[in-house]
Structures are given as C-alpha cells and as structure tokens.
Image: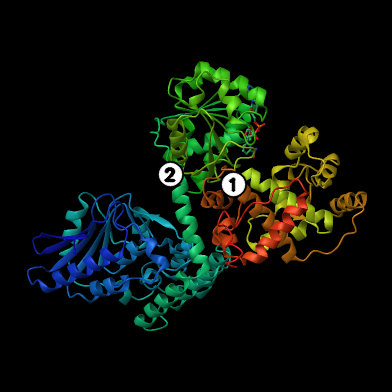
Amino acid sequence: MSGKVHLERDGAVAVLVIDNPPVNAGSAAVRRALLARIAEVEADPALTAGVLIGAGKSFIAGSDLREFDLPLADPQLPQVIAALEGSAKRWVAALHGAALGGGYELALGADARIAAPGTVLGLPECGLGIIPGAGGTQKLPRLVGRSRAIALICGGTRVGAAEALELGMIDALAAGDLRAEAVALALASGKRRAIERDVPEEPGAEIEAAARKAAAKGRQRPHILEAIAQVRAVGQQPAAEGLAAERAAFEHLRLQPEARALRHIFFAEREASRGAATGGTPGPIRGFGVLGAGTMGAGIALAALQAGYPVVLVDSDPAALDRARKRIGDEIGRSAVAGRLTGEAAEAARAALTLTDEMARLGEADVLIEAVIEDLEVKRQVFARLDSVAKPGALLATNTSYLDIDPIAAATGRPEAVVGLHFFSPAHVMKLLEVVPGRSSSSEAVATGLAVARALGKQPVQAGNAFGFIGNRIYAAYRAASEFLLEEGALPQEVDAALEGFGLAMGPFAVADLSGLDIAWRMRQQQAPQRDPRARYVEIPDLLCAAGRLGRKTGAGYYRYDEAGKRQPDPAAEALIAEARARKGVIPRVLAPEEIRSRVLAALVNEAGLVLEEGVAARPGDVDVVLVNGYGFPRWTGGPLHWAGQQDPARLAADCARAVADFGPQKKAADLAGLRILASADKA
Ligand code: NAI
C-alpha cells in the first residue's frame, strides 16, 4: 500500500522517496502512500525530521489529470499537506526536475524547500481552467507577496530554480547533492509553516494593477477572476477559512465545461505529439539547413537557432540574405532583452548561423527544410538539387502550404526521406507544426518530423497529404462563410467583432489584412478554370485587391490602418462591398452577432467533419489542436469539435445544413452524427 513512497533512513531523518514513474504524478495511490508514511515517521521516536524527494527524473510534476473528471478519491491532497503541517517534526521538500501544481503545493506544506539547479516550479493550474486547490493561492502570496502571486498563478508561470530562490518560492538552491543537503536542512531548527507567515506589505495600488493586468491577460475567464479573488483575500480571514474557500472554488471549477475543455485539449496535444504511431525511429537532429530566406525560411531558421541548433540558411537572392540576417539578428537581440535568451545563448545563436547562396553547404545538416516560393516546378527543381547535396539519412522537408508532397518527393532519388513540415507564420513564435507524410515517406522520416517539432518546442499534428492539409483547408471554409456574410449585409468589423466576442484571437478579416490579400487572390486566379460554376463565389476580395487594397502592407484592405497601425472601419472598403452586393442584386440586411457566429462556426465544423471523413485528420482531437494552436481558436472551448460536442445537437445540425447550403449544391455535408461529433438525432 505504501509502495509508491519508500521510507529510507538517514540517521534521525526519514527520507520519503516518491516513486510513481514516469514523472511522479500525484495520484490517489501516491496520496495514500504519503499519508501512511508521514504517520509512520510521526509515530517513530527515532526519527526527528523528514525529507520529501522524488525518485527518477523529477519531484511531483503535477496531479494525475485523469482523476479530475470524477469525484476525487480520499485522501485528498489537502489532507496530506495538513498531515505535514500538523506533524511535530520538521519537513523539507527536496525538489528536482519539475515541482508543479499539486507537486509545488505539497512542497509548500513543508517547513523548507530546497531545489536542484534546473528545477522548474510553479502553479500552472490556471492553464487548465481551475485554480490551485491545495493551498497554493493561500501560501504563495505569503512567500512572494500578493501582486507577484497573482501574476505567477494567473499566468501559470513556470519559474526556474534560481529565480524561485530570488522570489522566495524556495529557501535554498542545492550546491551539490540535493538529498544530502536536504537532510542537513531537515536537521536545522524547527517548524516554519508557510500558511502561518505574514503576507508581505504592499501598496494596494500595486496589487490592483497586478489584478487588472492578469484579468486582461487571462481574458476575464472565471477561473482567472477566482484566482485573483482568492489571493486578494489572503490575510483578511483566518487561514483555515481561506483554505476552505480555495478548495470549494477549485472543486466547483474542476467540473465546469471550461475546465473539461482545457483537459480535453491538454490530452489531445499529448496524443497529437505521438503522431499516428508508425513505429519509426527518428534520425539524428544535430543541425538544420533551410532553403529560402524569406518570411518563412528566416522564421524557421530563427526557431532552430533559439532552440540551440546550428543553421545553414541558403537563398539565391543576396538581398533576401541581407534582410534575413538583419531580421534574425534583431529578433535574437529582442529575445535577449526580454530575457527569453541569456546573453550567452544569444551570442551562441548568432554564431551558429551561416548565411550563404551555396546549396552545397546544406550537406552539413541532418534536417533540410525548403521554404522557397509556392510553385511546384520551382520546388521540384530545388528538391532535385537538394538530393544531390544532402547527406545520406537526412530528412528532406517542404514547408509548402497547399502543394502535393508526392511530386515534390518524386523529384528526388529518395522519396522515402521527404515529408511536409508546415510551419505557421511567424515561424519562430507559432506553436503549431503540421507533419505531412507523402505516399512514399518512411516511418523514420515521419518520426523525425515529429521529433523536429519537439526539438523546436512546437506542437506537432500529423496531417494527410491533401489540399490545405488540416488547418488551411478548414480555415478556407471558415473564411468563405465569413465572406458570404459580407455579401448579405454584414460589415467586416461586425463579423470580426462577433467572432472575437466568441473568443477568436482575431476575426477573419483582420487576419486577412495581416497576412495580405494577394496570395489568396493569385490562387483564385490560378484556380479559376477549375472552379465549379455552381459554387457561390464572393467577389469582394477580388475588388479590394484590384483597388490595390492588399491589407496592412498597403495601409488598407478590409480596414484602413492609422499611424499607430490600429485598424479602423473604412468607408472606401464598405463602398466596394456595396458595389459587389449591387452587382449580384443583393439587398443588404442586418446580421446579428449570433447569426454571424452560428453560421461561420457551423461552416467550420462541417469542414472539420469532412477532413475527418477523408482521413486528412486521424482524430477529432487533432483538428482541435490545429485550430487552437495555429488559428487562434479559443483554447477554453477545447477546439471546434469539442465545442461542437457541447452544443445542442439538433440546433447545430440545422446550422450545419444551412452552412452547407450556403456554399452551393456542390458542397458535401459531413456526417457529424456518424463521426460522433454530434450526438445522433435519436439521442438528441
Ligand atoms: P517568400 O517569398 O517570403 O520567400 C521565398 C524565398 O525563397 C525568397 O527569399 C526567394 O529569394 C527564395 N528562393 C526562391 N527560389 C529559390 C531557389 N531556387 N533557391 C534558393 N532560394 C530561392 O515566401 P514565404 O512566404 O516565406 O513562403 C515560402 C514557402 O512557405 C511557400 O511554400 C509558402 O507557401 C510557405 N508558407 C508560407 C506561409 C506564410 O504565411 N507566408 C505560411 C506557411 C507556409
């Protein structure tokens, strides 16, 4: 029964070793074992103090979230912590690896905390739609002050050991052997409970400012506001009342739809990172070669440099190389100023970049990523050259947005080494990476593609080799549905406001202006001969482009941009929209925000259903991970398909039928009930 926690003796000090591989996640079994061991130590007069330490690579990296959908089994974490605090003996938490969430709360129950260098600590609960529920909100403010605690808890910030020491989150940094130093610390003087400490004095205005900032950053979500309220109340009431109020709020939030949605996306991301489990072993990743130093190539190079890899960046245009050198240098400088890179790491990143027009230099790299212009013939020529310079075993990847991977792979003598790696712009910031196997890609190449994502700190999702892969395909339907609304009478700012009100980071027309309207324009011109004449075609974007309104870069698109770069509604754009309506004889009408949301989201959900039916996405969770990480879909909804599953099925089915009809008779309806995205009609 106590197998998850071993009791070892070091003289008069009990060392409790928590052993629940792989990361010592706090589960019911761990809590039971801890409670039993603490009681054993308490009852043994030969033991005067105790140390809590993790076996393997970590302290407790967090709670076992699989338990969170059900009533939590006893003993619960507050009981374990109360046993530590109620113990007559002195307890020290010895931290290494990760001490997060319930793990750090357990450590806060000890009388002192010591961490090995490199330990990550924090209370990330807010990222999961809940608040710390075992004393975190009540004790952290006593160690670091209320305003700091608000920022750390609401931001779910992971803090490194050195900073944690500076802030007061830990009492000591281990210089050598963590366990031995913790034992020595346990032998020092008596009890010092965090919950009994006074809250540091702070000007009220500072606390208010921290609260406002955290609420805005956390988009006023209920759990963020709750965390702020809990921290604010610390010291204003007896400690026991504070702990009870925190627990009650945690219990309430844990079972709310928002927390369930955030757990869904957490597990979906983990599953997506494993890909489709083809069993391949990834090849080595010691250095990157990037071909094409434009927007994407420079961003990808930057991502690799910031992750600590050497990069050879090749472009045939010397001006492009110059621009990339400047942009990468500036960005590394900014990262250093912002503290994302240490001065040393920034220096190393600069030194690790080679800019050249010689393709032969790409022979040094294990992973080659092509990001030249979106033209199949150019890409085929480039891959034929890559084949002749790449070392055996190298991964050959294309960052194409829409092109078929197979003819690109066929331009080489080693199509098995070719995959799509679809990054998002800006590539050094955006988390998402679609990994696209072609027909001939080996399982090793796919595994290496997934490993590239891990190496660069990205979230991979495996996608089928079909037009637009998962994300751009679904986004195109979403954007088309938004354009239909313009044609019927809505204004760009109304559509954007309705969708931003739903929680999207940016509405579709603000996004279009940001990325530029010309790329899609060119694509529509290319596709014009194959266009199905039955498909509804909205001319508004073509009219904007023809008028030179290509978006932000030309100062105007769906909006105009003021000197500060802020978007403003533009009567000139509205006149073009009115002209397009008039040409089709449309009499504009007012569209309410609810109608805008329901129609656009239904179009998105239907397309996501088609993507699943066609096998372009393997799992509904993969679609959710793509839209949340690459397209600003609100994380707290769990992504579009999780969201769809929470809606009234009859109503969403009707919305989807309407959305499909909007596109014209050629549009397919996804079988959302058959896909189990909607509860079937008889259950509804
Ligand atoms: P870009 O036009 O900014 O950069 C392309 C670069 O490739 C230019 O610097 C050009 O000089 C260079 N280049 C062209 N032919 C070359 C050759 N034969 N050898 C060496 N260098 C050559 O284009 P961008 O936007 O960076 O796009 C690159 C690729 O990434 C395209 O396939 C695009 O579809 C894809 N992509 C673009 C995204 C975006 O938001 N811009 C997002 C995701 C993918």
| Three-letter amino acid code of the residue under disc 1 | Glu
Q: Earlier in the sequence, mark 1 or mark 2?
A: 2
Q: Quadrant of residue 425?
A: top right
In front here: 668 or 112? Answer: 668
Circle number at residue 613:
1
Of circles 1 and 2, the one toward us is 1
From where the camera sits, is residue 358 visible?
Answer: no
What secondary structure is found at the residue carrying circle 2?
A: loop
**Residue 541: % across, % down:** 80, 45
Quick check: which quadrant has ligand 1?
Answer: top right
Q: Neighbour class for label 2 at 10 Å: few (<14), some, many (≥20)? A: some
**Residue 412: % across, % down:** 54, 20
What secondary structure is found at the residue carrying circle 1?
A: helix
Q: Which residue is mark 2?
A: 274
Q: Distance of mark 1 from mark 2, alpha carbons?
A: 21 Å
Residue at point 44%, 32% (across, down): 443
**Residue 55: % across, % down:** 23, 53
In front here: 212 or 570? Answer: 570
| Three-letter amino acid code of the residue under disc 2 | Arg
